[in-house]
Amino acid sequence: MFDIDLMSRVPIYEQLYRKVTQLILKGVLCEQDKLPSVRSLATDLGVNPNTVAKAYALLERDGIIYSLAGRGSFVAKPDTLLAQERVLRDFDTAAAHALDVGVTRETLCERIRNIPETKEESAV
C-alpha cells in the first residue's frame, strides 16, 4: 500500500506524504484509520525511521493526520479544500518545470483536455 520508488529523484519522505494523501483522497484510508507505526513502516519499506517520521510530521503539520501519544498516528477528518490547494500547488510546480524543459503551453492544455472527467470515462 505504501509503495515508494527508491530510485526516484523525489525524496522518500515526499513520496510517503503524497502516497498517504493519495490513499486518503481515493478512500483507501478513511478518517480515524490508524497508520502503521514509524518503526514498522520504515522496516517494511527498508528506509530510515527518521524519513518516515519526517513524512508523518509534515502530514500532521498540514492537518492530514494527527498523533496521540502512546497510541499512534491516525487519519484526520479530510479537508477537501486544503487537499485541492496542495494538488494545485503541485500541478503549478510540474507545469512550470514542463515549460522550463520546452513543453509548450498548447501541449499542456491539450494534455489537460484529454484527461477523463470521471473515473468511469477513464475505464472506457
Image: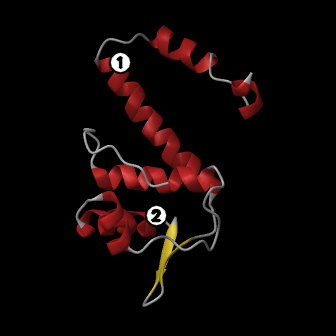
For disc 2, the neighbor class at 10 Å (few under 14, some 14 to 19, many from 20) is few
Q: Is the C-beta separation of discs 2 and 1 under 8 Å?
A: no
Q: Given the image, on which type of amino acid does mark 1 rest?
A: Leu
For disc 1, the neighbor class at 10 Å (few under 14, some 14 to 19, many from 20) is few
Toward the viewer: 41 or 79? 41
The quarter of the displayed image where residue 42 is located = bottom left
Secondary structure, mark 2, is loop
> What's the residue at 39%, 67% (across, down)?
56
**Disc 2 from disc 1: Cα separation:** 29 Å
* Image position of 15 (left or right of 20): left
Toward the viewer: 40 or 114? 40
Residue 91 location (% of width, % of height) = 46, 34
Toward the viewer: 121 or 101? 121
Of labels 2 and 1, earlier in sequence is 2
Disc 2: which residue = 62
The quarter of the displayed image where residue 39 is located = bottom left
Residue 109 location (% of width, % of height) = 54, 15
Q: Which mark is residue 11?
A: none
> What's the residue at 46%, 13% (across, down)?
105
* Image position of 10 (left or right of 27): left
Q: Given the image, on which type of amino acid does mark 2 rest?
A: Asp
Residue 98 location (% of width, % of height) = 36, 21
* Image position of 108 (left or right of 99): right
121 up-or-down from 105: above or below: below
Residue 54 location (% of width, % of height) = 30, 65
Secondary structure, mark 1, is helix
> What's the residue at 58%, 70% (across, down)?
76
24 up-or-down from 99: above or below: below
Q: Which mark is residue 99?
A: 1
In this figure, what is the number of numbered marks? Answer: 2
Rendered-image quadrant of the C terminus: top right
Toward the viewer: 18 or 40? 40
